[in-house]
Image (cartoon, rainbow, N blue to C red):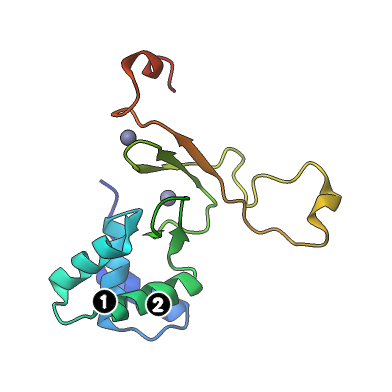
Amino acid sequence: MAVVPSPSEYVDQLRGADLRVTRPRVAVLEAVHALPHADTETIFASVRSSLPDVSRQAVYDVLHALTGARLIRRIQPSGSVARYETRVGDNHHHVVCRSCGTIADVDCAIGEAPCLTPSEHDALDGFVLDEAEVIYWGLCPDCAPESSTADSS
Ligand SMILES: [Zn+2]
Ligand SMILES: [Zn+2]
């Protein structure tokens, strides 16, 4: 298991991002950290277990604020609802199972964002890149037929 940050670390993160420290914000950070790639409903249910009075709208608002401050990252594979994670800033990618929708992290092959640069620089037409969002699609080990899992690395 990875080290679980203490609530005071979330408080520091919020302060560092110039966000007011509120219990729902700390609770949402805890929930997103504990449940990587969880959707809003799952995060809401988790926050609700520690803060029974929190409203759905409050959780939406907190997710929006934390995403804007880049304390959490929002991903939304096509056909999926938005999902959130606390692993930010490393430009890692995601692999999604076409069958069951499971999402896993894939470390960036090159390491620095954006790790994919267009082959023709002029193609950017003046845009300055900071991220390349890549989603790999396939079948997870549970869904893949036996024969095709043999050479997965
Ligand atoms: Zn699957
Ligand atoms: Zn991820």
Q: Residue at x 38, y 72 (%)?
A: 63
Of residue 25 and residue 134, the one placed in the foreground of this image is 134
Of residue 84 and residue 12, the one placed in the foreground of this image is 84
Residue flagged by tag 2: what amino acid is it?
Answer: Leu
Name the spot of residue 74 as percent of width and height, x first.
45, 61
Outermost residue on the right side: it is 122
Please say if 16 is above or below 121: below
Q: Is residue 12 visible?
A: no
Measure the alpha-carbon separation of dots 2 and 1.
21 Å
Name the spot of residue 30 as percent of width and height, x first.
27, 66
Q: Residue 44 sits in which quadrant?
A: bottom left
Element under disc 1 = helix
Q: Residue at x 72, y 46 (%)?
A: 117
Residue that numbered label 1 is attached to:
56
Residue that numbered label 2 is attached to:
14
Does residue 82 appear to the left or right of 40 in the view shown?
right
Residue flagged by tag 1: what amino acid is it?
Answer: Arg
Of residue 107 and residue 16, the one placed in the foreground of this image is 107
Mark 2 CB in 8 Å range of ligand 2? no
Name the spot of residue 146 as percent of width and height, x first.
32, 16
Does residue 130 appear to the left or right of 124 in the view shown?
left
- Quadrant for the C terminus, please: top left
Name the spot of residue 28 as percent of width and height, x first.
29, 70
Of residue 128 and residue 141, the one placed in the foreground of this image is 141
